[in-house]
Image (spheres, rainbow, N blue to C red):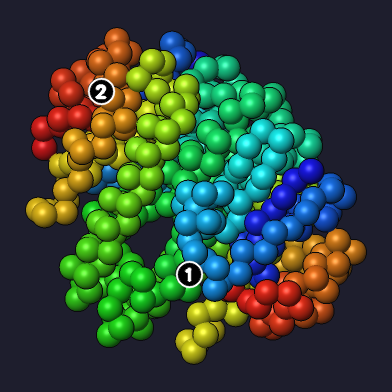
Amino acid sequence: MYILHHAADFASSVVHFALEEMDLRFSLSIKDLDGGDLDTPAYGALNPLRLIPALEGPDGPIFETAAILLFLSDRHGKLAPAPQDPDRGAFLSWLLFTSNTLHPATMFLFYPHRAAGEAASDAARQVAHAQIVTRLGLINEMIAEKRPRWLSPDEPGVLGYYLGILVRWLSILPPDPFKVTADRLPALHAVLAAHETRPAALRVAEIDKLGATPFTNPKG
Amino acid sequence: MYVLHFAPDNASLVIRLVFEEAGLPYRTALVDSAARRADSDAYRAINPTGLIPALETPQGILFETGAILLWLADRHGFGPDEAEPARQTLLKWLFFVSNTVHADLRQLFYPLVYVPADAISGHYSLLSARLKRHFTLVDQAAAETPRIFAVGGVLAPYLACLMRWSVLYPEGQLPWFVLDDYPALAAMARTLEARPATQRLVHAEGLGPTPFTAPVHANAPQGGTAG
């Protein structure tokens, strides 16, 4: 039994998709981010970073979206290549690339002032946008060329859900003309379209109110 | 046989420290900075992201420092495996170090990639304040779960290198990083620095005798520095 500390359509939704797709027993502990739910001592003990997601399980609390995805995949043998699988290295390379290169650039696009200051926000947003377009292009090329089964239209994977949420946000959150979709990235688009129509994904989309096509055609 | 694509005093140093400490056989292939600029297609055939390091293995090429560390840890048994309760402690801090500490340092070291020249000093203040908070959190974790941060695991060399570069870069700005502000990490860095494996790399990459506790700029016998 897991407890996911969650707010709909934040990074914890990625973990929500994974838990549902793995058919695990879990409950949601909904956090009011504006109401200070992450500032309590109890939450600090779960996640000293004071971010969501955090996941409580039999081994205690774990945080960081990609760490949780990898932990669940390894523990339950689902949705990613296992540690001894020949595909493990490629999967880890692209998971880390998504987590430490694409995801930070996405945050930088949404909140450029946090690192750049208010005055340089527009310039910083242009940099982040260009980086994101390049990086999603690399992922699209990799899928088209290698057809990996861990990021595929044919079977679900944690990285498909992770990229789905990032592309969702990129499609609706930035001001024009900085929105980014997967419309011109056909290999990635096919993976995301297959993920968002899975029964587990439809259940999560309904609970988190993400709409019918949350990755390929989200409604802002 | 592993082949590590490296540049002196670059993120590849983290992987080299793991290889040397574990006594694993590996070969290095220098990616010099001129080749990266002039002929990036050649290196991009190895690593499509163009970043250092990349590791050739019998099961294909890996890239991303954190990915290579985790793969090696699982393959050679350096860290808690997926059945151990401590596994999740390793994973959450490895990802935090990779996607928050390392990612913010990248911005701090190469500010002109991210902001116009007239915004650099504000960018520097904001990011260095953030990074101090990050290192404080990691230091608390290292004090609470020392096994995960011990020499012989994969977090120790990663953090030691990030702290080294935090002292050295970016050049021309007031220093912001003081190792002794983070006592658990400082103790780890002192232990790692004294290891024979580390001292072999001090020689190979020209890092100076105290690469983690009192770093100086590298003066590599091969290939020049890359930061």
Give me the disc on residue A87: none
Provide residue A173's location: percent of width, then percent of height.
17, 46
Spatial CA distance of label 2 from label 1 is 37 Å
| Left/right of residue A38 with respect to residue A193 in the rendered view | right
Tell me the quarter of the picture where residue B7 sits.
bottom right
Does B176 sit above or below residue B14? below
Q: Nearer the viewer, residue B61 or A66?
A: B61
Tell me the quarter of the picture where residue A37 sits.
top left
Q: Chain of mark 2?
A: A
Q: Tell me if residue B161 can be seen.
A: no
Q: Nearer the viewer, residue A183 or B44?
A: B44
Give me the disc on residue B37: 1
The quarter of the picture where the C terminus of chain A appears is top left
Does A110 sit above or below residue B214? above
Residue appearing at x 40%, y 18% in the figure: A156
Tell me the quarter of the picture where residue A17 sits.
top left
Provide residue A54's location: percent of width, then percent of height.
45, 36
Provide residue B62's location: percent of width, then percent of height.
60, 43
Give me the disc on residue A193: 2
Provide residue B163's location: percent of width, then percent of height.
62, 69
User: Under tag 1, what secondary structure?
Assistant: helix
